[in-house]
Amino acid sequence: MLTVQGISKRFGQRVVADALSLEVAAGEMVALLGPSGSGKSSLLNMIAGLSSPDAGTVTLNGEDLLAQPPEARHVAMIFQDFALFPHLDARDNAAFGLVERGMARKQARGLAEEALAEVGLSGQGHRRVWTLSGGEQQRVALARALVTSPRLMLLDEPFSSLDAHLREQMQAEFRQRLRSANIPALLVTHDRDEAFAMADKVAVLHQGRIVQCAAPAALQAAPASAWLARFIGFDNVLDDGVLPQEALRVESGQPPARILSLSRQADGVRLEVEAVVGRLVLRLSAREAAALPVPPEVGGEIGLGVDLARMRGFAAPDKIL
């Protein structure tokens, strides 16, 4: 288990980590989600040993990581650009970590070939990395990380440069392999959908602090604050909680809501309306929009019921972490 306790870091007047604490169990993935500058990559760098915290502790299975040099921590890190060596072929890239640890090159290459086969690159070890596709390069980076049997995996936005279809495929492969190897993992991402799809828990950072750390379903059911609710994608954030779309009923006979703006989307229509509880966003599917007695238009009205019983309240303070 990775345990981070009270980690703090300051660069001049800028605080990038303010008493951060979290735990990652074996085989678990925790996503670090937050806006740029919130401290996500800084935390990864301190765990990896690329920078040192001003205060706090980091332990892995009870061992003090901060007392060890980076090369002794047995932590693998995969970056956005994969950090492959262009002058080496796929096999030697995958074998690099083993050779650096002193393993004989022949043995390291043999293990690298096995690791490449496990990630779907059997027989491709001879290829120069610049001849590989983005997905193939990412598989080489994964093989290089896994072949060293790391005790911890750190992922710094490794999927952001891939197209949507390949990104989803690689996310699923990464998650499966890390879980089967029982390796704890931290994933830095700006992408809410990626965090919710891959992680067992999501830690949302803002200004160097963890605002909330919970399972994706728990975050969506009860976000910790109005800021967090808006950040993870809720449209209708009120003083006491958030109104999901299922709390809004479009029916004749309901109180009228004036349409302030309208935008057509691939799967329907997005309306901004002035309702009895304030300004709301209403999303209608193409079928729902077509079923309206009068086509919606800016300045017009629509009957809108609001079921406040469906409001999702903000998380209690003792449920945030």
Image (tube, rainbow, N blue to C red):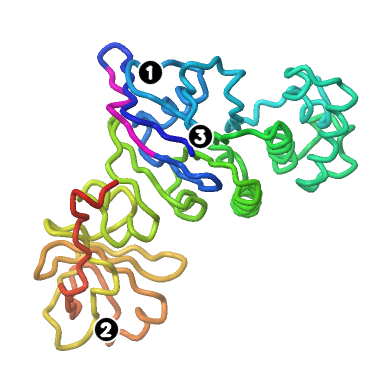
Residue 61 numbered tag: 3
Q: Is residue 88 left or right of residue 240?
A: right
**Real-space Cα distance between discs 1 and 3?**
20 Å
| Secondary structure at numbered mark 1 | loop
* Camera-nearest residue between 171 and 307: 171
Residue 186 numbered tag: none
The x, y position of residue 251, in whole percent, is: 22, 85
| Mark 3 Cα-neighbour bin, 10 Å: few <14, some 14–19, many ≥20 | few
For marks 1 and 2 on the same chain, the one whose residue lies earlier in the sequence = 1
Most common SS among magenta residues: strand
Of badges 2 and 3, nearer the viewer stands 3
Residue 53 numbered tag: 1
| Mark 2 Cα-neighbour bin, 10 Å: few <14, some 14–19, many ≥20 | few
The x, y position of residue 189, in whole percent, is: 47, 40
Q: Mark 2 is on which residue type?
A: Val
For marks 1 and 3 on the same chain, the one whose residue lies earlier in the sequence = 1
Q: Are marks 1 and 3 in contact (CB under 8 Å)?
A: no
Q: Which residue is identified by label 2? A: 294
In the image, residue 99 lies in the stretch drawn in magenta: no
* Vertical arrangement, residue 276 with respect to residue 170, above or below: below
| Secondary structure at numbered mark 3 | loop
Q: Point out the residue furthest to the top here.
A: 12
In this picture, which residue range is highlighted in magenta?
Answer: 14-22
